[in-house]
Amino acid sequence: MNDQELLEWYERATGFHKKRAPGLLIAAAIIDSCSLRLGAVKDRLNAVCESVSCLTDVIMLMTGCTIGNRYLTIHGDIGRFALTLFDRADGRGVRAFIDLDRISPDETPELYRFFYRTRSAEVKAGGEARLKSGEQVIKEFLTVRDKVIGLQNVQVERFGKHNKPGAARCSQCGESFLQKNGANRCSICSGEFSYYRRID
């Protein structure tokens, strides 16, 4: 993919993500490199993302691997700006990441600050300074893109189509839930999980 095509994906991703972020363009570039290395798949393309960031949105947009179709797995606790694309048939995959050893603080200072999260307080505060920094990050990234994207051939350990648990009706709230280990109550009613409280 050339720079112009990459910028077009960036614009599409910005519309989906709802804000301009340089990580969207960088994500598009590493997904493109990863896809090219992987080549054709026998079954379905699946993806693993190692962070909760811009990268997840671009994976969904460019590959069709989503949380909803269960072709995308997110391991946000890892926190690395990296992904793996793999063939669900055999687990053959390619992992893509940014090689920090190849980002020069002298040649590409704003890109360096972006990945080390050391941009100025003014930039971190948002507004015009953040937009200008983002534009500079993109400009610098495009000059070193092929140099800083790292690729590794990998074998994914858990692949194939995973079975979804059966549905059951919660004995307490009466709602349908995915039943695990024969539970008769959903995780909210059982107290295992909570993310809201009712305010009737």
Image (tube, helix red, strand yellow):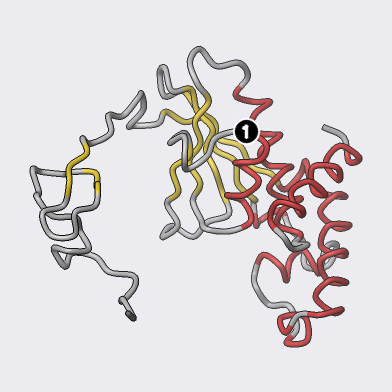
Residue at 51% x, 36% y: name it. Answer: 47
Q: Name, please, the residue furthest toward the front.
A: 200
Q: Is residue 140 above or below residue 122?
A: above
Residue at 64% x, 51% y: name it. Answer: 99
Label 1 packing within 10 angstroms: few (<14), some (14-19), many (20+)? some
For residue 187, which quarter of the picture? bottom left
- Across and down, in percent, residue 34 comes to 63, 33
Q: Name, please, the residue furthest toward the right.
A: 4
On the rendered structure, is 125 left or right of 154? Answer: right
- Across and down, in percent, residue 193 comes to 24, 65
Q: Nearer the viewer, residue 113 or 188?
A: 188
On the rendered structure, is 62 left or right of 74? Answer: right
Which element carries disc 1, helix, strand or loop?
A: helix
On the rendered structure, is 26 left or right of 66? Answer: right
Q: Nearer the viewer, residue 47 or 96?
A: 47
Residue bearing the label numbered 1: 63
Residue at 24% x, 47% y: name it. Answer: 177
- Across and down, in percent, residue 159 comes to 36, 27
Q: Amino acid at mark 1?
A: Thr
Q: Quadrant of the N terminus?
A: top right
- Across and down, in percent, residue 188 comes to 22, 63
Q: Is residue 17 above or below residue 45?
A: below
For residue 41, which quarter of the picture? top right
Q: Quadrant of the C terminus?
A: bottom left
Q: Is residue 159 above or below residue 61?
A: above
Q: Is residue 49 above or below residue 188?
A: above
